[in-house]
Amino acid sequence: MATIIDFNAEGVITKEMDKAKVNVWKSDTRTCMRMMLKPGWTWSACIGSNMTGQPTVCPGHHFGFL
């Protein structure tokens, strides 16, 4: 089964960070994200450097596709 997600719809959460914009859509059982990354964005510099312990890779487990 496929779900079409409108990231411009009401209820979609938008987060803007250093060199990135993220749209988050949630249902009862799933969360889906669209990330728009600017040139020079790296996880370790833009996200990890703001976390406790400053990890160089994301500690979360993800399933994704491009």
Image: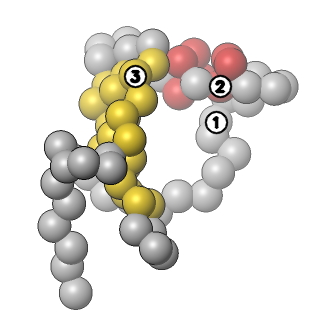
Horizontal side, residue 12 vs residue 8: left or right: right
- Label 2: how many residues lie within 10 Å, few (<14), some (14-19) or many (20+)? some
Q: Mark 2 points at which residue?
A: 48
Q: Can residue 41 be seen?
A: no
Decide which of tag 1 and tag 2 comes sooner along the chain: 2
Residue 10 place in picture, x, y as percent = 24, 48
Q: Where is residue 43 in the image (x, y as percent from the top left)?
A: 53, 27
Residue drawn at x 38%, y 15% as measured from the top left? 19
Q: What's the distance in space between the residues labelled 1 and 3, CA to CA?
A: 20 Å
**Residue behind mark 3:** 16
As drawn, the residue found furthest toward the right would be 53
Picture colour scheme: secondary structure
Q: Nearer the viewer, mark 1 or mark 2?
A: 2
Tell me the quarter of the picture where residue 2 sits: bottom left
Residue at the spot 67% in from the left edge and 17% down from the top edge? 49
The tag earlier along the polypeptide, 3 or 2, is 3
Query: To which residue does mark 1 refer?
Result: 57
Q: Indicate the secondary structure of the residue bearing disc 2.
A: helix
Amino acid type of the residue tagged 3 in the rendering: Glu
| Left or right placement of residue 37 versus residue 29 in this view | left
Pointers 1 and 2 in contact (C-beta within 8 Å)? yes
How far is disc 3 from disc 2 in space, using C-alphas?
A: 16 Å
Instruction: Name the amino acid type tagged 2.
Output: Gly
Q: How crowded is mark 1: few (under 14 residues within 10 Å), some or many (20 or more)?
A: few
